[in-house]
Amino acid sequence: MSNKEALESYDQTPFRTPDGYTSDIAVFTILSSKVGEFKPPHMTLMLMLIKRSFYNAEGQVNIEAGKWALPGGFVQPDESGFDAAKRELEEETNVNCIHLKHFGVYDKPGRDPRGWIITNAHYAIVPEHELSRRKANDDAEDVKLFSVEEVLNLDLAFDHQEIIEDAIAVIKHDLLHTTVAKNFLQKQFTYSELQAVLKTVTNDPAVLSEQAFSRKIKTLPFIEEVSGQKTQRTSKTPTQLYRFADDINIVRPIYTARY
Amino acid sequence: MSNKEALESYDQTPFRTPDGYTSDIAVFTILSSKVGEFKPPHMTLMLMLIKRSFYNAEGQVNIEAGKWALPGGFVQPDESGFDAAKRELEEETNVNCIHLKHFGVYDKPGRDPRGWIITNAHYAIVPEHELSRRKANDDAEDVKLFSVEEVLNLDLAFDHQEIIEDAIAVIKHDLLHTTVAKNFLQKQFTYSELQAVLKTVTNDPAVLSEQAFSRKIKTLPFIEEVSGQKTQRTSKTPTQLYRFADDINIVRPIYTARY
DNA sequence: ATAATAGTGTCTTTTAGACAATATCGA
DNA sequence: TCGATATTGTCTAAAAGACACTATTAT
């Protein structure tokens, strides 16, 4: 009995099927406010949201109109949810993503008034300057960046409050436990630039202290000193540049880490 | 213009929709082979699979018949994928899960010959004795435990090879980086019992060495000594018992961990 | 010279890692 | 007493944490 025969006799409609399958993207960037010449930057972690317009592309009244929401859209049958996220991010911001990662599925019954709709949630990291090319598309009347503190006070569409809370928790975790921070930095960076990124998500004194962190960075196995390369962009004294190694990232298991 | 009106004018079929939404579960257990009286146990991490039967409940020829697969099934419209996994696990093994966690979505076009089917993958941890009640249901002609080493040599249905590889990677990671190991242990346990669990997934000398690990366990912030409580089940000399604290689990960020 | 950032010297405390030694207790 | 597991003693090397101090350079 072949698989082919089984497939032919397979009843196509044994179960009710979902009314839609979508991919949403939490697009993060870091706004780097230049404090002044010869000073390390101050950084703020921002999330890009769209304001849902009152009419959609077909001229119909839009659902959840006027509310802020994550960009996203329906997955096509010939692509995966991840591919759809990549495509939508490019349509939305003209960016072929630097970093895109799936972090959750949202499928609670009743989460979308249009029916049984399953959403795959991803987060993306996009450099600030790339977002200048962002645009409001047919379904959006506005696009804006919000700090991760203010974003949760907005009137958000669907269950995007919950999705955004999860996204923020995930990127905060990943910034400290993986090397994604590299996506917010230039190829070569000073200890104080990396420090500025990490300061957006931690108060650990080992990160906050100049002395401690400028020493610590030299011992991190996934970061290497670029010998001889210095810059004056963060201070008058020429400052050592570092880069992330290409290797995989290692995390210390909890049973052997130091506490 | 209200949300209600927008909903009424919403075109129900603007996109092709998926042909199915399923939840699969990788059920892990640890077989604890009692080596002898007054000895610590030897443990093996096992995964439960079902063998797909040739005919399904309706008497039709089954797809991917004869192959080994993860238990799972279609999500109902009134439940989430997580709820479905919980329900299916209970139907399959009579177990209200001890630990169940979502770890991935599988939606590549063509992954299931029956059509556009999206699968939510979960892993569960079930104590060995609970699995004695496991049963083969209508769609399965056999249910069996495989060690994580041998399981990848089987002829596996659909893209379950990939899903299982991911599941094994996730549980190995979680055993070392979270406190899920507690689900494989009694409430109170000796250092050598915890060690036996961790030995199924690591060769770290700090875990392997009796002296090192029996000292280390006392310093772990998420494990507490049960003062005065001793047992002789692992050795002739009465041995200190420990328990996991109720707190949340802390992992050291890579930028401040010791290397 | 000053102010600001980067980086070093040095001391103390804690932890890791290794190896030897002791403790317990049923058989 | 023997044998196996648990646990402590002790030493060394490495790292963390704290604080003072030096280095650099545009202004």
Image: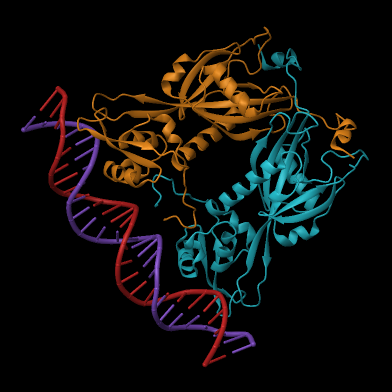
Chain colours: A cyan, B orange, C red, D purple
Give the image quarter of residue A162. top right
| Residue at position x 60%, y 59% in the image | A200
- Residue B59: x and y in percent read 67, 7
Residue A46 appears in the picture as rendered: yes
Give the image quarter of residue B242. top left
| Residue at position x 52%, y 28% in the image | B124
Give the image quarter of residue A192. bottom right
In the rendered view, would you say B11 is above or below B219? above
- Residue A115: x and y in percent read 78, 29
Quarter of the N terminus of chain A within the rendering = top right
Considering every residue shown, the one lying at the far top of the view is B59
| Residue at position x 88%, y 44% in the image | A54
- Residue D1: x and y in percent read 6, 33
Using the image as rendered, state which of residue A82 and residue A229 is in the foreground: A82
Considering every residue shown, the one lying at the far right of the view is A59
- Residue B144: x and y in percent read 48, 18
Using the image as rendered, state which of residue A223 and residue A42 is in the foreground: A42
Q: Is residue B44 left or right of residue A2?
A: left
Residue A190 appears in the picture as rendered: no
Total number of numbered labels?
0
Q: Is residue B252 left or right of residue A68?
A: left
In the rendered view, would you say A7 is above or below B201? above
